[in-house]
Amino acid sequence: MNNRNHNIYFHLHTISGILVCAILYVIFFAGSFSFFKKEIQAWEKGQSYTHANTLAFDYDTLIDSINAQYDLRGRDMELYLQADNYQAYISLTPSKDSLANAAGSEAVSLTYDFAGHRKSTYTESYDLGEFLYRLHFLAQLNAIPLNFAGPFGYVLAGLVSFLFLFALITGLLLHWNKIASNFFVFRPWSKWKTVWTDVHTVLGVIGYPYQFIYAVTGIVLIFNTALLLPFSKLLYKDNPNQLYDAVNNYSNDPFEYQHKPLQEPIDINTIIQKVDREWPATQLTNIQFKNYGDAGMHIVFRGAADPHADFAATGKLVYRVADDTVVFNKPANTDASYIDWVRALAYRLHFGDYGGYPLKIIYFILGIMGCIITASGIMIWLVARDKNTVPAHKRKFNCWAANVFLAVCLTMLPVTAFTFIAVKATHLSGQDSLYSVYFYSWLVLSVYYVVRRNIRRTHAETLLLGSLLGLLVPVVNGIFGGNWLWNTWREGAVDILAVDLLWIAISAIGLVAFVKMKARKPKDVMRRSTAKQMERTANQG
């Protein structure tokens, strides 16, 4: 590669990477824990969902309860069923009936726990698993009143995915000629710049396919509306709903509201039993109630086949309540269409829900590797610019930028472990409580290390603190929940056990890394500590 191309790729890779590094770290870190979302929810509630799919779910009782409180007449209601049907997210649209009372006039979001028979609003049931899952695509930032073609948090996550993909491509071009030789080179006892470069390169090559998949699928899942707009005009004659319905596996059928109440009571359990007979070996994923209680009421069922049997097959059944008739039926065990395959590849590759715990563990490790690659990239950027030829004001800016980025990123480990301990020890729940604990502790710890201005100690201390707090997670679970490791193992509560073992593994590796870091004596140490460097540049500035 000639020097001109090398310099172009180098600067493009560096600029795109440094622009998104801190946000990308947050996405990878929270996203890694999101693979265990269901397990974290079970751990927090102290109730295993391992055998939830063997329970008999009473949909009639659930819907009667919702109807009594929110008046379902004329509403559209949707149930998003979670894996193993342990929980459902429920959304209600405002009623189409002009005579509906105040209870039916507003949109509502609910959560229902089938195992515990508990109904609550979405914010009341907001738990740590949901928090980390939504943090990985920056949903919390949607509260910022800025809307550029979508909620601010989603748009920002999509832009970061674009820049991340750009950094991946330029990084591959930059290292292409030496990609094989550099893969086998790691010099842990050399100077710091060499160590960070080797970590960044080796882990980057190992995790490249995973990171590329996540960048592409992240863009597709977040920006699908903008990406599909040209195709809607070409293939669907400016009717985008048809394309979005096909790609998102969603029903936007125009079922007309007839303003005539149903003559017979609705027996949802019986209807679902009929669907189960129509769809053997199929997992229901979504139930939509259109025009509830009206003569024009339809129920749209969606399901997916076991991914081990069929990776992409999905089914759709439309049931007309008034005359007890199935008006459309595409079973999930039929051949998957091209759209089914495209949708399944995007969703399953992104969420890693098709390979059980072995795949979750692999995805988690690769996600944490993404965090390490991001942090090492920041250090390479800083050390490469720690030269006397660089003006003092630029060195000052570089040190402050790296210090802030790393303080925000590296404190996520102890803050996350602390939040696990807090929710179990104090039994706090709800969106406001979780936001307060996580974000305020993150802010305090980040500010502390920013003011501390010692990047090496930030690395060491956050690693040690996160590891020690992580070891307390299973202890707190045993003390306040009675779910000691041996109890969950004996009871077959694999989901709760998985969270405790995950934290033990993270803490053990973190402590080993801390000990190795403290014992390390490189041949060519950095010429000065970060604190002294920043002090000197500040004085010169």
Image (cartoon, rainbow, N blue to C red):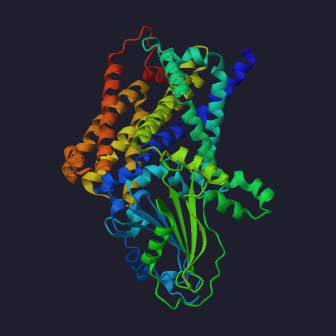
Q: Quadrant of residue 453?
A: top left
Instruction: Establish if 415 lies above or below 402.
Output: below
Where residue 443 appears, as percent x and y from the top left, is 42, 44
| Residue for point 70% across, 64% down | 242
| Residue for point 55% across, 77% down | 94
The quarter of the picture where the C terminus appears is: top right
Q: Quadrant of residue 427?
A: bottom left
Instruction: Establish if 508 lies above or below 154.
Output: above
Which residue is more in the foreground, 147 or 453?
A: 147
Lateral position of residue 300 relative to residue 437, left or right: right
Q: Quadrant of residue 177?
A: top right
* Residue lying farthest to the top in this orientation: 523
Residue 541 makes an appearance in the image: no
| Residue for point 59% across, 88% down | 98
Lateral position of residue 17 relative to residue 463, left or right: right
The quarter of the picture where the N terminus appears is: top right
Which residue is more in the foreground, 362 or 72?
A: 362
Which residue is more in the foreground, 2 or 405?
A: 2
Lateral position of residue 338 relative to residue 285, left or right: right
Where residue 111 appears, as percent x and y from the top left, is 42, 66
Q: How many marks?
A: 0
Where residue 105 appears, as percent x and y from the top left, is 53, 81
Instruction: Establish if 49 lies above or below 3.
Output: below
Residue 256 makes an appearance in the image: yes
| Residue for point 60% across, 53% down | 152
Where residue 205 appears, as percent x and y from the top left, is 55, 25
